[in-house]
Image: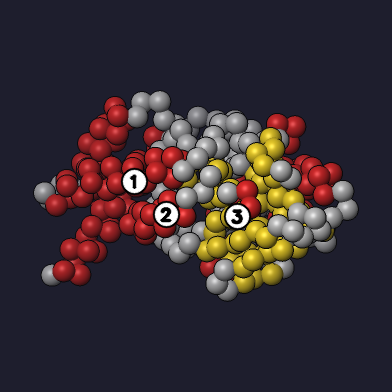
């Protein structure tokens, strides 16, 4: 396995994309998310922490410098370690709030993902030294409107897609949407299909989520990883997932085995998108879609 680049968050590269709304960009580094800092008159919300306590400490210090005494909140788009496994640093400094489904993911699968990520190599393992699975301060059901003072931020669970607990973060007055890993740019979509340990991702559900997000028409989309853009960030991911679905289901319907489908589909999609990163996510996506195809066929019979 190729050694991963150190997944360090660099707060010095923060960019203001709207008044009192900054993004700390991931700059194309694996396991570094795009992190949001959203301000109102009375409070500031941080969206995602980076992986590990050292990254989160830098994010917290940066957010505090932006806040200048305003109250701090933290939320995470989903439970995966590079997004949420620095939250312990914010304890006592910020109120950490997430949706019910994400809290359930943290409790049920957080420890397993912590160990899995520690196995990705010494650089990642060192980032996860001393990390505990985070425990939110506030867990909400349904949607949650967070009043920052003159600016309301909407925390909205989407239903199962990339994970069961996906949450998007909307800043309506700025037309900005933080998607977490429901969207990335410049790479193949991340479908964490790891049977038998984790098979909660659903490509079919993910497509339905993207349909709803596209219909909302955000002006600016901040993906989990990759460049900030407009609605095309969402439509491009949707187009790819449709492409992956159609190529997979056509072959599955003809009776091909999963491994053969994965090899063929990988070849086709890499040829179509040679510049994209994350080719290793094609095979898990094929596995997920084969299972969903088979489930639909069984339901019809």
Residue 137 visible in image: yes
Q: Nearer the viewer's eye, disc 1 or disc 3?
A: 3
In this figure, what is the number of numbered marks?
A: 3
Question: Which quadrant of the figure has residue 300?
Answer: bottom left
Q: Residue at label 1?
A: 241
Q: Position of residue 249 (x, y in %)?
A: 21, 50
Disc 1 versus disc 3: distance between alpha carbons? 27 Å
Q: Would residue 57 be visible to someone looking at this image?
A: no
- The picture quadrant where one finds residue 169 is bottom right
Using the image as rendered, state which of residue 233 and residue 215 is in the foreground: 215
The vertical placement of 71 against 232, above or below, is below
Instruction: Give the class, few, some or many, for how many residues have Cα within 10 Å of label 3's Cα (few <14, many ≥20).
Output: some
- In the rendered image, the quadrant that contains the C terminus is bottom left
Q: Position of residue 243 (x, y in %)?
A: 28, 42
Label 1: few (<14), some (14–19) or many (≥20) C-alpha neighbours in 10 Å: many
Q: Is residue 293 left or right of residue 113?
A: left
Residue 181 tag number: none
Looking at the image, residue 48 sits to the left or right of residue 244; the answer is right
The dot on residue 215 is: 2
Q: Secondary structure at mark 1?
A: helix
Mark 3 lies on residue: 172
Local SS, label 2 = helix
């Amino acid at each position: 396995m190729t050694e991963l680049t150190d997944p360090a968050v660099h707060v010095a590269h923060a960019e203001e994309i709207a008044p009192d709304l900054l993004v700390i960009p991931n700059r194309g580094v694996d396991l570094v998310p795009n992190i949001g800092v959203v301000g109102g008159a009375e409070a500031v919300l941080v969206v995602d922490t980076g992986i590990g306590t050292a990254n989160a400490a830098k994010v917290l210090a940066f957010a505090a410098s932006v806040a200048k005494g305003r109250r701090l909140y933290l939320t995470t788009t989903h439970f995966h370690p590079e997004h949420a496994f620095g939250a312990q640093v914010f304890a006592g400094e910020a109120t950490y709030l997430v949706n019910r489904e994400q809290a359930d993911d943290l409790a049920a699968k957080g420890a397993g993902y912590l160990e899995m990520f520690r196995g990705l190599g010494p650089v990642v393992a060192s980032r996860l030294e001393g990390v505990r699975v985070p425990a939110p301060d506030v867990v909400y059901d349904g949607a949650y409107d967070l009043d920052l003072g003159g600016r309301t931020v909407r925390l909205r669970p989407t239903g199962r897609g990339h994970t069961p607990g996906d949450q998007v973060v909307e800043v309506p007055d700025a037309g900005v949407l933080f998607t977490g890993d429901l969207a990335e740019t410049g790479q193949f979509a991340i479908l964490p299909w790891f049977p038998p340990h984790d098979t909660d991702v659903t490509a079919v559900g993910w497509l339905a989520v993207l349909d709803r997000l596209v219909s909302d028409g955000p002006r600016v989309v901040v993906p989990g990883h990759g460049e900030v853009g407009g609605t095309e960030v969402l439509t491009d991911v949707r187009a790819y997932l449709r492409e992956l679905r159609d190529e997979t289901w056509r072959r599955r319907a003809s009776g091909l085995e999963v491994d053969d489908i994965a090899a063929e589909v990988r070849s086709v999609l890499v040829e179509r998108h040679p510049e994209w990163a994350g080719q290793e996510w094609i095979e898990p996506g094929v596995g997920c879609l084969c299972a969903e195809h088979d489930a639909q066929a069984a339901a019809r019979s």
